[in-house]
Amino acid sequence: MPKNFKRHLITAALPYANGPVHIGHLAGCFLPADIYVRYLRAKGEDVKFVCGADEHGVPITIRAMKEDKTPQQVVDDFYKIIDTSFKDFGISFDIFSRTSNKEHHETAQAFFKDLYDKNLFEEKESEQYFDEEKQTFLADRYITGTCPKCSNENAYGDQCENCGSALSPEELINPKSALSSSIPIKKKTKHWYLPLQNYEAWLKQWVLEDHKEWKNNVYGQCKSWLEQGLRSRAMTRDSNWGVPVPLPDAEGKVMYVWFDAPIGYISATKELTPHWEDYWKKDDTQLVHFIGKDNIVFHCIIFPAMLKAHGDYILPENVPANEFLNIEGKKVSTSRNWAVWVHEYLEDFPDQQDVMRYVLCANAPENKDNDFTWKDFQERNNSELVAIYGNLVNRVFVLMHKLCGGKVPPFHMDIKDSLDDKLYEKIVTSKKAIEESIDSYKFREGLFQLIDLAREGNKYLQEKEPWKKKDDQKSIDNCLHLGLQLCANLAILGNPFLPHTSQKLCRMMKVVDRMLEWKNAGSIQLLKTGYSLNQPTLLFAKIEDEQIEQQMEKLHANAIAHEESEVPTEAANTNPIKDEIQFDDFSKIDLRSAKIIAAEKVKKADKLLNLTLDLGFEQRTVLSGIAEHYTPEEVIGLEVTLVANLAPRKMRGIESQGMILMTEDADGKLIFVSPKKASKVGSPIH
């Protein structure tokens, strides 16, 4: 930390309440924030960790429309899932609030009114995009088109998720309504704008001069924005979902989500403590925003400009943003169901939160996009957590019970040697190195220091070989005394990273949580001589190939199930038509009529049916994600359309040899695209 602070306010980006939390979210901001907060708490600092669900985003209204629900129903459902996922995983918020709460609405409206009363907004009547078919003004996210910077044809009106550029709808090439796919018209409407250009000189000084220590990705993106020049940005939208604009002539207007969402940090703190102003209005508070790179501009330019305009609030000391985490070489996509969902991971790997914490931190996208793979997950668990950390602790405790009667042996100074000194020095230097890493937001580096300390402990045991010195009890005592003190240090130093593991170690050592206070690290007098300890329990379990295969199959099966259910209905047609193809491309697809002659559910796969298809000249096995819509008995005998030359894919140990074409009825139920006039099964479909 650059200076001493009396208190700390740590925030993590508010997740949209339009879907569950996936591991990309964890790696992006929630896990690094949690590591930092646990470290500060262990040091005895006054710290509040606040977050909440962002419940007013346009994706929520799109999802509500698609599912024929109200926005409130959508956010209520997903708030429960998100909140439970965080709690079960061990993200230790002091509060996880909601922007639909009354407290937040009142706080955001008071903030808006303060700026309005100071005449800091520009009131403009302008032409906005309007969907004539749906008879509604289109928020930026309701408009899609081609990004002018990277040519991505699926860019949104406020941002391109491919290159990360912030956009306005006017910049899009060939804009279309995401609600109806029609070409929108321009229609007059009135809104309130924050003239960001008025804060440009101040922002250049505050960001580019006063915060050169910020991460390169944060500093660079801010520099690019500021050098391009800022302009007025609308802080209100035409909508019936959001925080209503608190003005008499603002019917049908709500606050722009990126105006109200960061104020959620303030309203959540107000909910948490009556002393909230100490954390938001006193200069001796350190405010740190943990975010993903797609939120840099909003947290480093727009929200600080809002805070500066208001005048009563402190500004962030740092905004350590991570890059993106891909999965198996592909960008995480909730729309395509290409994700590892936190709640599903916890179901499949109960009580193994720290394994995922370790892998996500060890492979954190701190400086560039990184890739999560299930094989790497298995390898890091088996070769690092099990073979290094868990192995050390188990060996020390087993030997202590076998050679020292289950009690902490004494340390005999008269036979202390260079190996003992080297291990002690490693404990001390590791504490300092981990401190420096966490203080500078280099959590991956800190984790490497932790596992290296455990590695040094294994090396120490191997060199000492206490199991070979049964006639030299004093040597055995010294080795295992230091080994146990090392385990205690690992519990303290590892607590920010692997809190569940540290709790297991505390139970094995029969000590209270106070031992995990950071000031205790670096000592070799943590466990008293003669103190009896519990039998060891395994800290980590080996992950077998079969478990990894199941996760890979699940990942692909979920994506396939989504592909088969994705159809362009009026309510769900939010994606533009894919790139144009030539006839030669289409002619490569071999569509055949086929008959389902057998069907059964796939074990441990709720969405999959294992189908046997008769093509007349051969039979095929096809896995299809339709089990939530059909029982095996219902589909036997049906004629279907099969993509017959699709490359085989193995799932749940079964090779799927094609894909069945599906569509949806008005209620969202999957129905088969049947070749009713086919002369016989196996006939080509042209």
Image: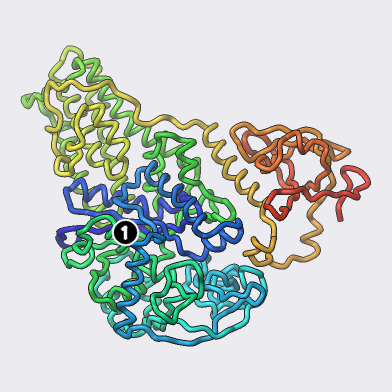
Residue at figure coordinates x 16%, y 60% from the top left: 5
The answer to which of 223 and 636 lies nearer the viewer is 636
The quarter of the rendered structure image containing the C terminus is: bottom right
- The location of residue 127, given as percent across then percent down, is 54, 85
Q: Which residue is mark 1?
A: 268
Name the residue: 43% across, 30% down: 542
Furthest residue to the front? Answer: 248
Quadrant showing the N terminus: bottom left
Q: Nearer the viewer, residue 368 or 132?
A: 132
Q: Is residue 221 above or below residue 648?
A: below
Which quadrant of the figure has residue 476? top left
For the image, the number of numbered tags is: 1
Vertical side of 28 occupied by 401: above or below: above
Task: Examine the image and state in which quarter residue 408 appears.
Answer: top left
Residue 137 in view, yes or no: yes
Against 161, is 98 above or below? above
The image shows residue 682 at horizontal and vertical percentages of 87, 44
Amino acid type at image mark 1: Ala
* Residue sticking out furthest to the right: 679
Q: Decide if residue 358 is in sight here.
A: no
The image shows residue 259 at horizontal and vertical percentages of 39, 71
Q: Is residue 169 above or below residue 470?
A: below
Residue drawn where x is 59% and y is 40% of the image: 553
Residue 220 or residue 479, whichever sits in front: 220
Residue 205 image offset from top left, x and y in percent: 26, 79
Q: Is residue 315 left or right of residue 57?
A: left
**Rendered residue at 30%/40% (across/down):** 499
